[in-house]
Amino acid sequence: MPRLVIAGLEACYGSLKVLDGIDLDVASGDVIGLIGPSGSGKSTILRSLVGLTPPTAGSVEIDGDNVDYKDAASVARLRDRLAIVFQQYNLFQNMSVLQNVMIAPTKIKKRPSAEVEEEARALLAKVGLGDKLDRYPDELSGGQQQRVAIARALALRPEILLLDEVTAALDPELVSEVLDTIRVLAREGMTMLIVSHEMGFIREVSREVVFMDAGRIVERGPPSRIFDAPTEPRTRDFVSKILRH
């Protein structure tokens, strides 16, 4: 049984429909790569899932539980199960790395501080920042800040992790350290939806790749088929252009 089921999902920005009938199911441990041109709706799927861009039609279920995006309690329960990491790190500049990772579990989830600190230290070690606990964000590189943001999301103990262009704001030499962190999570079985323009990485880490255009899913399948033998003309056109560069 799929862990996450999206059916007929629609979303709008004003009068502009940006998602148009999205159907997608995600099993536990799946890594789904979302690719497509800018403005195709990839990031909006992630924003809609967590209620930042509330859907205007369709349904979302997690483990058979339907999400009511008009009900604050339902959205709060959803956000206990999903965590999202954005392109921008959005760290608290007046807090240390350790404090940034601890704040949501202690203040929002009311978990014991000692327990949260132990877990936060372990998470920061996992993302390669065990020696940066007392540093502040402005003392870190962009790649290090993004890894703190990933650790902060993991501290919420999400069942599904949503990654929205997490390397797009980084200098090229810093991209690999963030991708290495995501590789570790994939090997450990974390369920993830990843929006990225890093096509080689998407091909490597994804169980399934979803190609989107104009708010719709054009084609989906294993990476080998999407990148080597797509069936839809729009997918072939997109892949041929990105693989030439």
Image (spheres, helix red, strand yellow):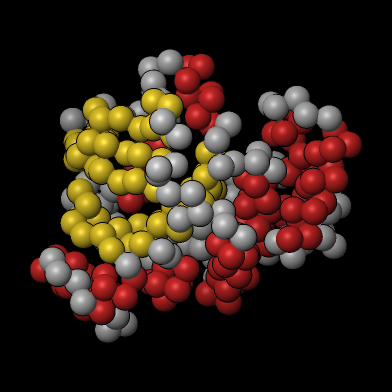
Please tell me whether residue 13 is drawn above or below residue 174 in the rendered image. Answer: above
Residue name at image x 32 percent, y 67 percent: 222
Q: In this orientation, which residue lies closer to the viewer: 147 or 83?
A: 83
Is 224 located above or below residue 79 in the figure? below
Using residue 114 as the reference point, say whether residue 175 is left or right of it: left
Residue that lies at the very extreme toward the left in this rendered image: 233
Q: Position of residue 238 (x, y in %)?
A: 21, 70
Q: Quadrant of the C terminus?
A: bottom left
Residue 5: horizontal and vertical position, in percent? Answer: 35, 39
Count the numbered circles shown: 0
Q: Residue furthest front?
A: 1
* Quadrant of the drawing holding the N terminus: top left
Q: Position of residue 231 (x, y in %)?
A: 14, 69
Q: What residue appears at the point 68 percent right and 51 percent down from the top-left corner?
A: 151
162 sits left or right of 236 in the view? right
For residue 204, above or below residue 189: below
Q: Position of residue 72 (x, y in %)?
A: 48, 17
**What residue is shown at x 74% (from left), y 65% (from top)?**
128
Is residue 163 shown left or right of residue 229? right
Quadrant assignment, res 176? bottom right
Front residue (pair 16, 68)? 68
Position of 240 with respect to 186 (left or right) is left
The extreme bottom residue here reads: 244
The reply to whether residue 178 is visible in this rendering is no
Quarter of the image where one finds residue 90: top right
Question: Residue at 59% across / 65% down in the picture?
Answer: 187
Q: Quadrant of residue 102?
A: top right
